[in-house]
Structures are given as structure tokens and as C-alpha cells.
Image: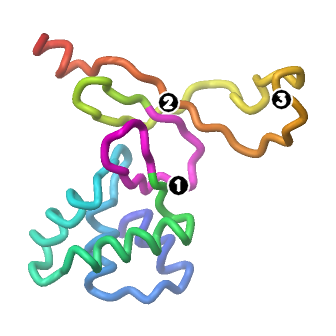
């Protein structure tokens, strides 16, 4: 059973066939699918699943804190099931591919108090940008 499915079962989330398929599609370490990609993959497993059900399920998973909604640029939002392990994202500036990265250090602690301007900082999001190997090879 996937990590996401285990977490959802542990929460007592009602596991319908449609919800299960969406969770299975999202399973993986470097999964960052758009809602339309989730729907396409879900239809391959469960042909009768509707786009509305996929969108509603993704919204529930985000509200539960089990999936992160990732917006790295003006492209479609992506959904990241790696919600319980702190990480940052590495994004290809050409094709939009996203990878989870786990650099050393604590970026929250690295922000000097003089740069906090009185804010009580509770979270940090870091996005690294570059060109992925596939796009670099095609250039």
C-alpha cells in the first residue's frame, strides 16, 4: 500500500473507489501532476471517474494537508503527495519538470533577524530553477 493511502486510512478517510484511484495516481516520490494529468491517469484505471470528482478529491487532499498544491510559475498548479517531509523544488525553466530536493541546512534559520522586519516567520518555500538534462541535451 502506498504511503499516501496508508496516511489516509490512518485518518479514517472514507476510501471510495474514486478516491483510492486518485491517491494511487499521486503515489510516488517525485510526483507533481496537474489535475488534468491526474484525471487522465485515473480514467485509465477507472474509466467512469469524472473530472469533477478528481478536482474535488484533490481539493480535499490539499485541505487535509496530505497533498501540497504547487504553483511554480504561470503554469497549471501541480499536486505533490510528499506533504510530510520538508523539501524544496527544483524546476526546469523550459519544460516545467519538477523534482523534490532535500538540501542541507535550515532556510528558515538562515534568514537573519535583521531581514525579518518584525515578522514571525513560520514557513519557507524555496524553488530552484534551471534546465533539466533532457532540455539541455535537446538544445
Q: Helix or strand or loop: what does disc 3 sit on?
A: loop
Measured from the top left, where is residue 83 in percent x and y? Answer: 52, 55
Q: Measuring 56% from the left and 64% from the top, which residue is drawn there? A: 65
Q: Is residue 93 left or right of residue 65?
A: left
Give me the C-alpha separation between circle 1 and circle 3: 26 Å
Instruction: Establish if 23 lies above or below 110.
Output: below
Q: Foreground: 125 or 134?
A: 125
Q: Badge 3: few (under 14), some or many (20 or more) residues near its Cα, within 10 Å? A: few
Task: Check residue 127 in the rendering and tell me which mark sits there, or answer none.
Answer: 2
Q: Badge 2: few (under 14), some or many (20 or more) residues near its Cα, within 10 Å? A: few
Q: Main secondary structure of the magenta part?
A: loop
Nearer to us of marks 1 and 3 is: 3
Q: Helix or strand or loop: what does disc 1 sit on?
A: loop
Give me the C-alpha separation between circle 2 and circle 1: 16 Å
Measured from the top left, where is residue 70 in percent x and y? Answer: 44, 48
Q: Measuring 27% from the left and 82% from the top, which residue is drawn there? A: 18
Instruction: Establish if 106 lies above or below 58.
Output: above
| Mark toward the start of the polypeptide (1 vs 3) | 1
Quarter of the figure with residue 74: top left
| Mark toward the start of the polypeptide (3 vs 2) | 3
Q: Helix or strand or loop: what does disc 2 sit on?
A: strand
Confirm or deny contact between disc 1 and disc 3 (CB under 8 A): no
- Residue marked by disc 1: 83
Q: Quadrant of the C terminus?
A: top left
Q: Is residue 16 left or right of residue 3?
A: left
Does the segment drawn in magenta span residue 85? yes
- Residue marked by disc 3: 116
Measured from the top left, where is residue 104 in percent x and y? Answer: 62, 25
Q: Quadrant of the N terminus?
A: bottom left
Q: Is residue 82 left or right of residue 120?
A: left
Residue stretch rendered in magenta on the structure: 70-89
Amino acid at each position: 500500500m502506498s504511503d499516501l493511502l496508508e496516511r489516509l486510512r490512518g485518518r479514517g478517510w472514507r476510501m471510495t473507489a474514486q478516491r483510492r484511484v486518485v491517491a494511487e495516481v499521486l503515489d510516488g516520490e517525485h510526483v507533481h501532476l496537474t489535475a488534468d494529468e491526474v484525471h487522465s491517469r485515473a480514467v485509465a484505471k477507472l474509466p467512469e471517474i469524472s473530472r469533477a470528482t478528481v478536482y474535488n478529491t484533490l481539493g480535499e487532499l490539499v485541505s487535509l494537508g496530505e497533498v501540497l498544491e504547487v504553483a511554480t510559475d504561470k503554469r497549471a498548479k501541480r499536486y505533490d503527495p510528499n506533504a510530510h517531509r520538508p523539501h524544496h523544488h527544483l524546476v526546469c525553466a523550459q519544460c516545467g519538470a519538477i523534482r523534490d530536493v532535500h538540501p542541507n541546512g535550515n532556510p528558515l534559520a538562515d534568514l537573519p533577524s535583521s531581514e525579518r522586519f518584525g515578522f514571525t516567520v513560520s514557513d519557507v518555500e524555496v524553488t530552484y530553477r534551471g534546465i533539466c538534462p533532457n532540455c539541455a541535451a535537446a538544445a
